[in-house]
Image (cartoon, coloured by chain):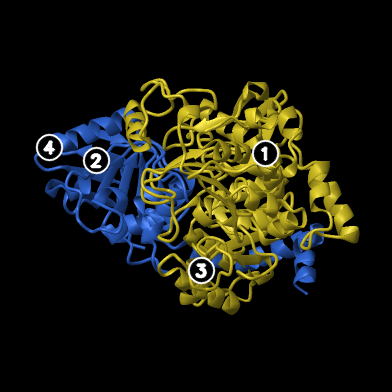
Chain colours: A blue, B yellow
């Protein structure tokens, strides 16, 4: 996982509430049993003129030349709602997005972001609207997300503080993998399970019985 | 100190706390399906990691397998076969039990896992699927995760999670006749919005919830994810014990007695505290129908499309929804002709759902031009329905009778409804293009779907029942 400390990049405003994971990566675009090959299907329903087509829908934000190469997405409340498919984050990340700024996120989506080094930045709706408005009017739609300082800043100097879970922040800053860290506790987990099996044998025993 | 059911389960599963303040929570059950589970198993295998407790992990084919009779590994969804083969191979390598597409215990993961007693009260359960919250209906702490977290759960039998806040939604009063758990779930979304759960563990409590049968509680908890909840849960009671007793993976003998005693002690203490408490009166609920492209955009069946600014969501999102759905403010829902009717999904495909729909369909036929489909939630549900003759009722009424699976709840490139086709659906999401390239989905109970199929337009099931 690539560490994220701070990033100044083109930011694309997609100011809709409840952008769901079906919209981010339609199920029909999840063609292989893989975390890769998804960028092309990102926002396919909005980005292309028809289902299955690859002809760009000219007015969709990511198709506008000024937002080419965007690495930050600015969007509405409840971003990432719907299906838990992690493919939504894989598609965003593969396309090049490293941070999403929104008033709120779906909890599963937010966890998926953190697991993949994409920073979910929560700012209030007013701040998000100001940022989106500024991006639309700016000559160059740039935004800075500073995870170390926990700030989002426009080039005109306006900046906002954001809160983020400190464990998530640490993992994102270091680009750390959770499985490797948890496996260091394998003995502790095994010991806990032994105690638990004595207390709740039905969690363990019936499975073995039914499986024969 | 007083504790909620959530606190009791959480505390019993906390292995340790990380330096950053996350809890390392023991996971009792990991469920996987071929859509998002195969990629998790494969990810684990690519890293050379074994499954920590293979006896406690289960995989099932449900999402992209066909539901047409005579199905095989070949799917209508292009490349769907790859998912089936990859999941089969990865489950075999990992040594976990797979309920394959021809297994008599196969079904939609959230239907078959309670049915088999894989879900148990007081257990922690995760699955890379957002509707995992359904299983909270049995008093399990069950929540949806992503594929990377599923890899973590498989590799370590734990997850790192920050303790979520708690919300109680207390629902008192009785549901009126003809009003179901689905209507209740939709009414809650209409009242509190799709952000209403705000990452909390939502405990549904109150007399209306206790009055619900277990299958109805599964429907209510199912839409916890539409509510943006961390998950949903209902305290286990005698109904849950009756439901589980004798199920293949449920405990028996002395283990059952000990388990049952503990399960009944899980209920929240009378003075337990919640970060948020909400009240709701079940008597206010009518059969509900969504009009827009978010489940919160919902009205009583005799209602009209609200004016922009008066419904749930921003004015901009309402305008988009009106445009997509081909509606004008003020339009009466029951005036809308439909092209298709769908009964199925992890929300409403259990035997009780099929029985209630069949009761309306018996001796009647769907209106001309309406494509009507019923997809039982599991192979066991299908067989039970067939033993009761319900399949004949559905077929005589003009419904297709399918093999079990997720089917047309979502579109994966295979089967779909047509562009701009108006569909009344017992599913859980009415997002743009969720069910195909451009269909207009209206969410409702199985009764409302059946009534609408008969009428050829959106219809109030209570009026059909009365005829």
Whether pointer 3 and pointer 4 mark residues with C-beta atoms closer than 8 Å, the reply is: no
Measure the C-alpha gap from mark 4 to mark 1: 60 Å
Query: What residue is at 41 percent from the left and 70 percent from the top?
Result: B79
Q: In which chain is the residue bearing label 1? A: B
Q: Kindly state the secondary structure of the residue where label 1 is placed.
A: helix
Q: Chain of mark 4?
A: A
Q: Where is mark 2, residue-wise?
A: A13
* Viewer-side residue, B445 vs A134: B445
| Number of the front mark, 3 or 4 | 3
SS type, badge 2: strand
Task: State which mark lies toward you, 1 or 2.
Answer: 1
Q: Which residue in the protein does label 4 denote?
A: A138
Q: Residue furthest left?
A: A139
Q: Secondary structure at mark 4?
A: loop
Q: Considering only vertical position in the picture, is B370 above or below A175?
A: above
Is disc 2 on the same chain as disc 3? no
Discs 2, 4 touching: Cβ within 8 Å = no
The residue that appears at 52% across and 38% down in the rendered structure is B443
In the rendered image, which residue does mark 3 sit on?
A: B38
Q: Is residue A46 left or right of residue B44?
A: left
Q: Could you give the CA–CA distance between mark 3 and mark 2, rounded to whole angstroms?
A: 34 Å
Q: Is residue B446 above or below residue B86?
A: above
Q: Is residue B395 visible?
A: yes
Quadrant assignment for the N terminus of chain A? bottom left
- Residue B165 image offset from top left, x and y in percent: 57, 37
Could you say whether the residue bearing mark 3 is in a helix, strand or loop?
A: helix
Query: In the rendered image, is residue B117 in sight?
Result: no
Cα separation between marks 3 and 1:
39 Å
């Amino acid at each position: 996982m690539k560490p994220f400390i701070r990033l100044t990049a083109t930011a694309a405003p997609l100011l809709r509430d409840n952008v769901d994971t079906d919209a981010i990566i339609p199920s029909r675009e999840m063609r292989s049993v893989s975390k890769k090959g998804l960028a092309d299907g990102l926002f396919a329903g909005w980005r292309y003129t028809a289902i299955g087509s690859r002809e760009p829908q000219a007015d969709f934000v990511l198709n506008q030349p000024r937002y080419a190469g965007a690495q930050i997405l600015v969007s509405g409340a409840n971003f990432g709602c719907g299906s838990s498919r992690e493919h939504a984050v894989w598609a965003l990340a593969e396309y090049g997005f490293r941070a999403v700024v929104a008033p709120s996120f779906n909890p599963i989506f937010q966890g998926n972001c953190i697991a993949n080094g994409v920073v979910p930045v929560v700012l209030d709706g007013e701040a998000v609207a100001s940022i989106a408005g500024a991006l639309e009017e700016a000559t160059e739609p740039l935004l800075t997300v500073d995870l170390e300082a926990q700030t989002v800043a426009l080039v005109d100097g306006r900046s906002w503080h954001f809160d983020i879970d400190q464990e998530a922040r640490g993992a994102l800053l270091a680009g750390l993998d959770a499985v490797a860290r948890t496996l260091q506790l394998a003995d502790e987990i095994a010991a806990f399970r032994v105690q638990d099996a004595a207390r709740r044998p039905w969690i363990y025993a019936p499975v073995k019985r039914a499986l024969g | 100190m007083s504790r909620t059911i959530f606190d009791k389960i959480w505390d019993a599963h906390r292995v340790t706390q990380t330096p950053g303040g996350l809890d390392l929570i023991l996971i009792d059950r990991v469920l996987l399906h071929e859509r998002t589970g195969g990629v998790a198993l494969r990810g684990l295998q690519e890293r050379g990691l074994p499954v920590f407790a293979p006896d406690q992990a289960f995989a099932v084919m449900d999402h992209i397998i066909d539901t047409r009779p005579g199905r095989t590994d070949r799917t209508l969804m292009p490349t769907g076969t790859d998912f089936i083969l990859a999941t089969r191979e990865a489950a075999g390598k990992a040594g976990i039990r797979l309920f394959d597409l021809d297994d008599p215990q196969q079904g939609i993961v959230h239907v078959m896992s309670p049915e088999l007693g894989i879900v148990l009260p007081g257990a922690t359960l995760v699955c890379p699927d957002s509707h995992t919250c359904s299983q909270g209906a049995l008093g399990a702490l069950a929540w949806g995760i992503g594929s990377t977290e599923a890899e973590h759960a498989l590799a370590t039998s734990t997850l790192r999670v920050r303790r979520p806040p708690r919300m109680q939604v207390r629902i008192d009063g009785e549901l009126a006749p003809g009003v179901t758990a689905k209507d209740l779930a939709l009414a809650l979304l209409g009242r509190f919005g799709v952000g209403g759960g705000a990452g909390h563990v939502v405990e549904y409590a109150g007399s209306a919830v206790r009055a619900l049968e277990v299958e109805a509680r599964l429907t209510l908890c199912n839409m916890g994810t539409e509510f943006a909840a961390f998950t949903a849960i209902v305290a286990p009671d005698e109904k849950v014990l009756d439901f589980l007793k004798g199920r293949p993976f449920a405990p028996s003998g002395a283990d059952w007695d000990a388990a049952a005693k503990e399960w009944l002690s899980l209920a929240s203490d009378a003075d337990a505290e919640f970060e948020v408490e909400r009240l709701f009166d079940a008597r206010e609920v009518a059969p509900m129908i969504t009009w827009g492209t978010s489940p919160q955009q919902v009205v009583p069946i005799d209602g009209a499309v609200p004016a922009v600014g008066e419904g749930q969501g921003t004015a901009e999102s309402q305008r988009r929804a009106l445009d997509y759905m081909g509606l004008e403010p003020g339009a009466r829902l029951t005036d809308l002709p439909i092209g298709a009717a769908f009964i199925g999904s992890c929300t409403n495909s259990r035997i009780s759902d099929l029985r209630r729909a069949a009761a309306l369909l018996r001796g009647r036929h769907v209106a001309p031009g309406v494509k009507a489909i019923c997809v039982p939630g599991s192979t066991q549900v299908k067989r039970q329905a067939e033993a009761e003759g319900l399949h004949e009722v559905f077929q005589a009424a003009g419904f297709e009778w399918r093999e079990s699976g997720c089917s047309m709840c979502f579109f994966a490139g295979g089967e779909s409804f047509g562009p701009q086709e108006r569909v009344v659906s017992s599913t859980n999401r009415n997002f743009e293009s969720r069910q195909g390239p451009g269909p207009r989905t209206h969410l409702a109970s199985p009764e409302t779907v059946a009534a609408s199929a008969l009428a050829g337009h959106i219809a109030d099931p209570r009026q059909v029942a009365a005829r």
